[in-house]
Amino acid sequence: MNRAFDIGIESLAATTSSGAGPAPSCAPEPARRGAPAAKSFYIETFGCQMNDHDSEKVAGVLLGRGYRPAETPADADLLLYNTCSIREKAAQKVFSRLGDFKAAARDRGKVVGVLGCVAQQEGEEIFERAPWVSLVCGSASYRRLPELVAQIESGGRRVTGLDLDTDETFETELTRRDNPIRAYLTIIEGCDYSCAYCVVPRTRGPERSRSSASILGEVRRLAGAGYTEIQLLGQTVNSYRDPSARGLNFAGLLVAVAAVPGIRRVRFTTSHPSDFTREIIEAIDATPALCDHIHLPVQSGSTRILRSMRRTYTRQAYLDKISWIRAARRPISITSDVIVGFPGETEADFEETLTLLDAAQFDGVFSFKFSPRPNTPAQHMDSTISEVEQGRRLAVLQEHQRQIQLARNQKLVGSEHEVLVDSHHAARNQWAGRTSGNRIVNFTSPHLSLLGEYIQARVVRAGPNSLVGEHVS
Ligand code: SAM
Ligand code: SF4
């Protein structure tokens, strides 16, 4: 049994750099001299897994300064909003949420900070729109957080960290791990692509990779702490280039991570099609610990729209990579992202996206209506598609994909899969977990404690988004 439920904090300081040292400490480091005793913090996170993991590292920085976590925003002295601005709705939510804490900041002296993409995008404007905010820090400046928090502790108002021109990554002495089953680990930050619709290059800065020694050291510490599943993160995770003399490429890093004793599953997201190589598939084929799932966003099935999106590949080049993956010795599930209603997308372009779904046979798709974002080339493009038409295309696409998923999942009925159990619904006595291919399997079991266990399940029923299994062993 190899479970990680007691893990709250992963401490770099508690282990040797080879990772062969004692298990990570679960206690925060003592407060530094001069830091206010027992101030509390609460972090609310919007957006993607990278934001979730950034929040884990920010929490680690604060724990290292002697802060304690608060149960609710109302109990916290320091309230942080880690924000997402990938689509307009996400960014709007942040300002409405900040409004909820105006009175608490003004009347009860709470310190409110905005982190992440909205912080980077709006910068000091946030102080104008929400004057009760004291800290604005974009994700490219998180390495400066200890210094920024120190400024706040000594009474600073309007403290900012907004530099983008960095070649450093955000590495922390402590990381609070919020997911007891799966450990996230950022291997590459920022993005050097310039997709016409996307804010990421402006909010997260240029691409920079962590050294393989630092990544492997962290994986060893996580394995020592009981984690068996690691998810490597990056906006274009497969563009990874080891900056150290070892010079591993992404496939080489995958193999090295999977070889760390104790690691049974390695996932990675998000892969960019242009950097997707046969070597990655060969690594998955040869290495059982590399999960058989690839998330490969296509965005559109029309080469004309892909060009207008500045996506750097054609429909055919994308489909060629899908056929490499389908030719692998192990069945590998493939998921994708699609944007509908990009400016200039005709009915014929949209039809090409539907036929690409048929050709690719994805196991899951995240689909979005195009949302114009500030300071992106697509913001002021002509031939916009009405909200109503975008909604119609989204519904058509989702129904089309639902049928594909249902048919693919139904073919799995009768097959057996290894499932890592990650949740339990006590009232229904129902357990759920994921296969290596990232499919959700729900099942019942007389066992009382399965969280974090690997079990074998046989699929007995299939829906479009999940499977129902029976616990075999
Ligand atoms: N780096 C990944 C890639 O190259 O595909 C994407 C990362 S982005 C955070 C996640 C997804 O959000 C994208 O794949 C895209 O489908 C969607 N997205 C990004 N900007 C968008 C926009 N302006 N409107 C709608 N969807 C958007
Ligand atoms: Fe955004 Fe494109 Fe970079 Fe992905 S590759 S983060 S979509 S700019």
Image (tube, grey):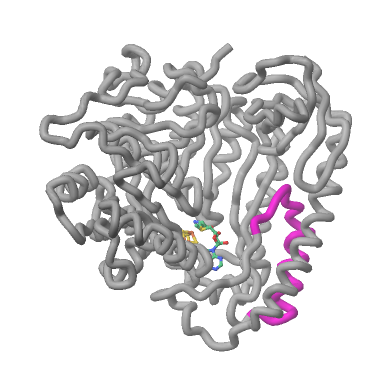
Q: Position of residue 344 (x, y in %)?
A: 61, 83
Q: Position of residue 250 (x, y in %)?
A: 45, 40
Q: Nearer the viewer, residue 402 or 270?
A: 402
Residue range in magenta is: 345-366
Residue 156 in the image: above or below residue 279: below
Judged by its main secondary structure, the magenta piece is helix
| 116 on left or right of 91 | left
Q: Nearer the viewer, residue 300 or 461?
A: 461
Whether residue 165 is visible: no
Residue, x 55% and y 40% (percent of image)? 280
Residue 290 in the image: above or below residue 144: above
| 115 on left or right of 234 | left
In magenta segment, residue 348: yes
| 169 on left or right of 92 | left
Whether residue 70 is visible: yes
| 99 on left or right of 459 | left
In magenta segment, residue 67: no
Residue at the farthest bottom position: 382
Residue, x 70% and y 76% (percent of image)? 349
Image quadrant holding the N terminus, namely top right
